[in-house]
Amino acid sequence: MAETHDVVIIGAGAAGLMCGRVAGRRGRSVVILEHAKRPAEKIRISGGGRCNFTNMHATPAAFLSNNRHFCKSAFTRYTQDDFVELVTRHQIAFHEKKLGQLFCDDSAQQIIDMLLAECRDAGAELRLNTAVEAVAATADGYRLQTAGGDINCHALVVATGGLSIPKIGATRFGYDIAAQFGLQVTAVKPALVPLTFQDGFLARCRALSGLSVDAEIRYGKTVFREGLLFTHRGLSGPSILQISSYWDTGDALEINLLPDIDCRAWLISRKAETPRQDVLTALADNLPRRLAADILDELGLSGRLADLPNAALTQLGNRVNRWQVSPNGTEGYRTAEVTLGGVDVDQLSSKTMEAKNQPGLYFIGEVVDVTGHLGGYNFQWAWSSGFVAGEAV
């Protein structure tokens, strides 16, 4: 005989565990199934092991979706302040790193332990190493086939995540369930991911590997200003990861390496003040010397400022303030922090996360077409969407 529960949640990540604790506290019989041997692997590795668990500035404006308004209801009902209250209640020390990003002082494991304790206290059962092999609708809910036997439930919550970081077990299973029950899945792609380049440009990046500068990166009307990192694989750092969610293959990006300085005007002014100064020495006053030397080498410029015509200084200023780069791709899901796209939000209730065409079927977290900026936003979506589904199942 198959066992029966009120709620089965597939996936013991951030969204699934939040949903489990909330549903369990409502007195629902809850089982959380996780195919991996450990829960919440993405929490464990996030934020350099300290988990950037939310952002104090989380608003719908920081999220991408085919329907930018969809996430408003969930964020209104469970806010970053609500999650901070939970963290504080569990006496987990944390700090704001920058731009509203909150990290554990100690370890991401504290967030995992908190969620597991909350689930245990709520009576939500977690089963690890339990892969779901098939799902079918029944007269009063769903039947799941697992290696450990069949499980019936009245409500099924899909919290399987996206395709990012396959080494920790990411799969297409959530999208497959959506398709099985007639829900559309938008195009998906790696997001918050380093960009890659052709060999010539890549060679320059490798020579500058390890250098980091504050930069402003523009793609169309979208602009981010954060750190830019040169690596042996191309360009990375927060500003690149942010813009990668917007960038389309084949398009160019514009990078301002000195966002607070009009480099052309500054160079011409410096030429008037100290004409005998070497252009490399001048440029290295505001940029790392290795980067300044690389830019000058690329443009074929050298010598004293006095010996360089203003047209050359204008060219140099434009290279610094409006550097055009053309990525040829991304590092892919292997290093992507999240997956852009997912289950089409127009087919879900924004208040409950339930499929409009399939009663009792819910989708939460990264598997849904709601993708946040870098900096704790995607965890907040997991907490908020998990909460509202937990209140509804």
Image: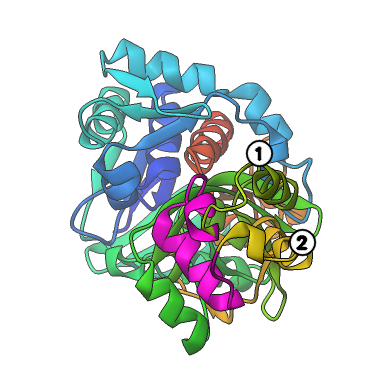
Q: Which region of the structure is painted magenta?
A: 279-303
Quadrant of the image occupied by residue 70: top right
Which residue is at the front of the view, 334 or 173? 334
Most extreme residue toward the bottom is 199
Q: Specify how the rendered protein is coloured.
A: rainbow
Residue, x 46% and y 54% (percent of image)?
Answer: 237
Q: Is residue 264 left or right of residue 97?
A: right
In the image, taking residue 306 as reference, residue 8 lies left or right, namely left
Q: Circle 2: is it few (<14), some (14-19), or many (20+) Cα within 10 Å?
A: some
In the image, what residue occupies the spot 24% across and 69% down? 147
Of helix, strand and loop, which one carries label 1? loop
Q: Which is more toward the observer, 306 or 299?
A: 306
Decide if residue 183 is in sight here. Answer: no
Indicate the position of residue 133 as horizontal and vertical percent values: 36, 72
Most common secondary structure along the magenta stretch: helix
Query: Measured from the top left, where is residue 75 in percent x and y?
Result: 64, 29
The residue that label 2 is drawn on is 310
Residue 260, numbered circle: 1
